[in-house]
Image (cartoon, rainbow, N blue to C red):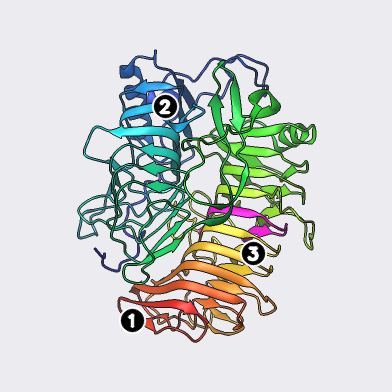
Amino acid sequence: MRPLAPSRRRFLALTAASAASVTALGLPAGPAAASPAGAATDAEPDFGPNVFVYDPTTPVEEIQSNLDQIFAGQEHNEMGFDRYAVLFKPGRYEVNARLGYYTTVAGLGAHPDDVEIHGAVRVIGQPDPNSEAGISALTNFWRSAENLAVTPTDWSNQWAVSQASPMRRVHIKGILWLEPGQQGFSSGGYIADSKVDGITINGSQQQWLTRDSELGGDWTNGVWNQVFSGVVGAPAQGFPDPPYTTLATSPVTREKPYLFVDGAGRWRVAVPRLRRDTAGTTWGAGAPPVPSLPLSDFFVAKPTDTAKRINQELSRGRHLLLTPGVYHLDRALRVKRPDTVVLGLGMPSLAPTTGDAALRIEDVDGVRIAGVLVDAGPVESEVLVEVGKPHSHRSHATNPISLQDVFFRIGGPYAGRAVTSLVVNSRHTLIDNIWAWRGDHGRPGTIGWTVNTADTGVVVNGDDVTAYGLFVEHYQRWQTIWNGERGRTVFYQSELPYDPPSQAAWRSPTGNGWASYKVANHVREHEAWGLGVYSYFNQEVDIRCDRAIEAPRRAGVRFHDAITVFLDGSGGIERTVNEAGTPVVGSYGTSPVVSYP
């Protein structure tokens, strides 16, 4: 089924007020403090008031009441500042967990099946009076489910999400339903290291990436860009009709770190191994144990901790666990030691306040950054996250730096500014589910062509970088620039900026508009699979983009299964890849290119 063409975000009314605090919600505080500030021991750690840890002895009525109260506060809290994590120790729970904004539900077992949810861990659609369906999931961002099993007690487990809402290491023991219902619009999404026993109903999902997973039943239909990389049971290659791009294996992967409690009750953080040419989950029958670190090796940070304090702990060799909340940073967090883990719990936000970056990573082996949201601040930052220094050439082939579930935002809660969101200089870096978003809606005064300014979402300078799930949208120049050699992208999704005020204000050195995906002219080798670039120019001005993807035409630079789409508005995109493709201008249309050159 194919939805009509309107933009996926413009209709939903923004709730400007932040959700109530934990106290105002009437929720009980999180676990009692059991150690000095910032320290973690084998006892119950102090994760602060916005983390709820349950075991099977907790009355189910208490768990359900807390889940319902969190959801009531977060259901419409799109640009708010509250963050939550709900964690389940191994056992069985009969609950219906509905996830609103900035909410993570995760299991604490060594294996997903150690935590059995009988009921649901689900995301539902939101009312959309401007949609023919009356409901959509177009702004269901910033939430996640991880490391647990769900046995749906309804007919399915609904996961109606769009960007920045990953499902990782989850076992769905039944049907998985990815749309809001009634053919309402949805614009997701991402699944990794997961298994679905029943069918997966894609429905209205415009695009989706499923990586290193197992599908026990059919994947039903598709809209524009459905990518499967290393998925057992994936549908056959069919692009553009059906719009399936299927890679038998993923070239190089390393799964996201996760928190768990071992058989002796000790808190640990799993750090999965690097894998090559993989298919299926990491936790199936016969899978080896996952290496892990004791939580006592981590500095457990709170939003009240300063950047100076956090950097002192990192310089001492501590890993970093960021508990839920917003971290206002007067200087960048600096990761200088090899193999450092920075893990966010409950979608914490890093918000630079002085124009520095939020995070700078040295060109060292094995750093893992996972589960954080980065908000541009009121003083323009040159870059928000920098991986390695310029001209880094050290090989990290056997132990790369990885970025997983790292989400960037320019505008929305604040009138933020940044020239570039992410710059990757280090070789062999793994990018795994990134959403870099220059906001198209937000709190009053935070959105506008001259308000939330940002040139480019992602710049890759390092060689041998691999990206899975690259979502980059609405930046004012090139969305993505790839300067490194032998880069690989598996799934790319991008909307061009909605708001260029005129063609004269939006012209690149190569013509009208700025291509979304730009491979530099000097690059000799590059390959990408499953790319979708969409237009919706909403200023009632005829704006054209000469090409969605711009790259040198040579045998070593290859694109598979690319598509452009006119969503709504004025103008459109003239070509898909360089000179290939047909115009999608003035009315709904698509232009697929199966192979280039």
Count of labels in the image: 3
Element marked by disc 2: strand
Q: Is residue 324 left or right of residue 101?
A: right
Magenta stretch: dominant SS?
strand
Q: Is residue 457 left or right of residue 561?
A: right
Q: Amino acid at mark 1?
A: Gly
| Label number found at residue 586 | 1
Quadrant position of the N terminus in the picture:
bottom left
Q: Position of residue 197 (x, y in %)?
A: 32, 41
Q: Amino acid at mark 2?
A: Val
Image quarter for residue 538?
bottom left
Q: Is residue 105 magenta?
A: no
Instruction: Estimate the spatial distance between the alpha carbons at disc 3 and disc 1, rounded to whole Å.
Output: 31 Å
Q: Which one is earlier in the sequence, the residue at label 2 or at label 3? A: 2
Q: Which residues are magenta?
A: 418-437
Q: Which residue sits at x=47%, y=70%? A: 496
Image quarter for residue 172?
top left
- Is residue 105 at least partly visible in the picture? no
Q: Position of residue 555 (x, y in %)?
A: 60, 81
Q: Which one is earlier in the sequence, the residue at label 3 or at label 1? A: 3
Element marked by disc 1: loop
Q: Which residue is mark 3?
A: 459
Q: Position of residue 209 (x, y in %)?
A: 44, 56
Q: Nearer the viewer, mark 2 or mark 1?
A: 2
Q: Which residue is mark 2?
A: 115
CB atoms of marks 2 and 1 within 8 Å: no
* Above or below for 390 versus 513: above
Q: Position of residue 192 (x, y in %)?
A: 47, 47
| Label number found at residue 395 | none
